[in-house]
Image: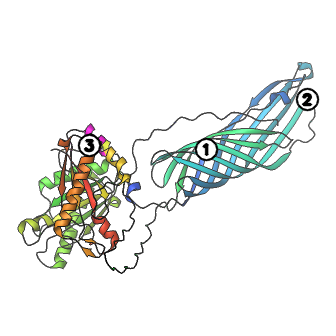
Amino acid sequence: MKKIAKTVSALGLLGCAVINSAYAAEERDESFWYIGGNIGQSRAKIDEARIVTPTLNSISIDDRDTAYKLLGGYQFNDNFSVEGGYFDLGQFSYVASTTPPATAGTKSGSIKLNGLNIDAVGMLPLTERFSAFGRLGLIYAQAQDSFSSTGAAPAVTNPSPSKTAANYKLGLGLQYDFSKALGMRVEAERYRIDDAIGNTGDVDMYSLGLVYRFDRTKPAPARKEEPAKAVVTAPIYVIVPVKVMTAQYCSVLNIEFEINQDEMQAEEKEKLAVLGNYMKKYPDTTAVIEGHSDNVGTSEKNLKLSQERAQSVVNYLMENFKIAESRLTAIGYGETRPIADNSTKEGQQANRRIGAVIACVTDIEGLKVKAARITVAMELEFEPYSAEIQPAYRDELARVAKYLKANPSVTATVEAHAGKFVGKKKVSEEVSLEVSKRRAASVVNYLVEKLDVPRSQVSAEAFGQTRRIAYGTTLEGQQENRRVNIIFNYKK
């Protein structure tokens, strides 16, 4: 078998329309194991000049075959992984005939190629789902040649030579992730091959494959708080670095109930129609349906009632919108998380509620909702007493501005919040309210003055420490309470 060569062709880019919601919803650990396989076509160019002679001058060549590979790998981070596996490049052959017919004879040859490889793979993420990659590897390939002759063709001295040798391979590819666990690849690779009779050449493989990843996500490690430091002349505030929350566009739907009831009213079911359509649009999202109650009655009864309310919403979504049960979770909190004063009827009514917290998505430009109010929120966090917008949020605010300008009928409310504590110091309600007002105004002004959003589309609301999402007994909880939510309001 003679030298084999062919150039690697260019690949076209695959399109990408949406971004998986769960990527933003969980802490990600980019080290994981994966397996996969590819199947496609191998191509070779048989060196005719080494075969043809004055008598063997008519040749027929089969230079393509089906090829496949099986692989396993470990990805260390977003940009680097190591893969090992088995490949089979198929079989290539030729038949050469003698002329003139009076001295008829043929000489034929074929080669089978397979082996093992280990590759270093460099990844370049282009979007959350779409990436390009290149590989450089070491192969240990077995070449099994076979030769025969008839008639006047030269006799074959060794009909079945074979050779196993180390060489290299390289390749380029594109990958599209359907989910965190499953991805698709299209690849072009070149294998450097030594045959069994002293020749060296290349075989190209063009293939399509799948990869399956294990343990892609795991819980974030628990944070260890530093011991409190003594204060001599002035308080020292230690700010816990919290992972910046970007691209957090989360649906929140509030439904209120009458006292001692778990049945929804007709107008609330209309709101759930929007929620059901939302989850249909994003089939990878999950939802936690949270039930709450006022403090009227016993704690045990209120906990049971809140669980029943949450479950009634889950049942409605499953029965009427065919949302899979695995995507829905009902949790009852009873009277433990009030958002209003239970000493008034209005406050009790506000506390008898359902909150639907939906796993986050990032393509708000494509969101279509029917007539009802559903909110989509982006969360920003701040340093103590500060209203300065962190640079990490500016790209996300630019996306908010783009969406508002493209949808002039949608308005946005900037809701600002503050905590009850900074370090061990208790902050007064008046100071918290003033800080949250400055934070809301800062975000509104940034959208209007820096990103050209019409002021008529944005408004600010400040809540001070009245809507805390954490108790504030830890430094991390305090930072979670220092936040701004941007709420998109869809007209009925």
Q: Amino acid at mark 3?
A: Glu
Residue 407 position, x and y percent, is: 24, 39
Q: Could you tell me how many numbered marks the image carries?
A: 3
Q: Is residue 165 above or below residue 190?
A: below
Q: For label 2, count other residues whose C-alpha is less than 10 Å away and answer few (under 14), some (14-19) or many (20+).
A: many
Question: Which residue bears the numbered disc 2?
Answer: 153
423 inside magenta stretch = no
Question: Which residue bears the numbered disc 3?
Answer: 449
Residue 275, visible in the rendered structure = no
Residue 95, visible in the rendered structure = yes
Q: Secondary structure at mark 2?
A: loop
Disc nearer the start of the sequence (2/1): 1
Which quadrant is the N terminus positioned in? top right
Residue 27 position, x and y percent, is: 42, 61
Q: Is residue 81 above or below residue 369?
A: below
- State the residue at coordinates (18%, 63%): 433
Question: Which residue bears the numbered disc 1?
Answer: 39
Q: Look at the image and give the residue range highlighted in magenta.
A: 400-412
Measure the C-alpha gap from mark 2 to mark 3: 86 Å
Residue 198 position, x and y percent, is: 86, 41
Tell which tag, 1 or 3, sits nearer the viewer. 3
Which quadrant is the C terminus positioned in? top left
Measure the C-alpha gap from mark 2 to mark 1: 37 Å
Disc nearer the start of the sequence (1/3): 1
Mark 2 touches mark 1? (CB < 8 Å) = no
Disc nearer the start of the sequence (2/3): 2
Q: Quick check: 199 left or right of 407?
A: right
Q: Secondary structure at mark 1?
A: strand
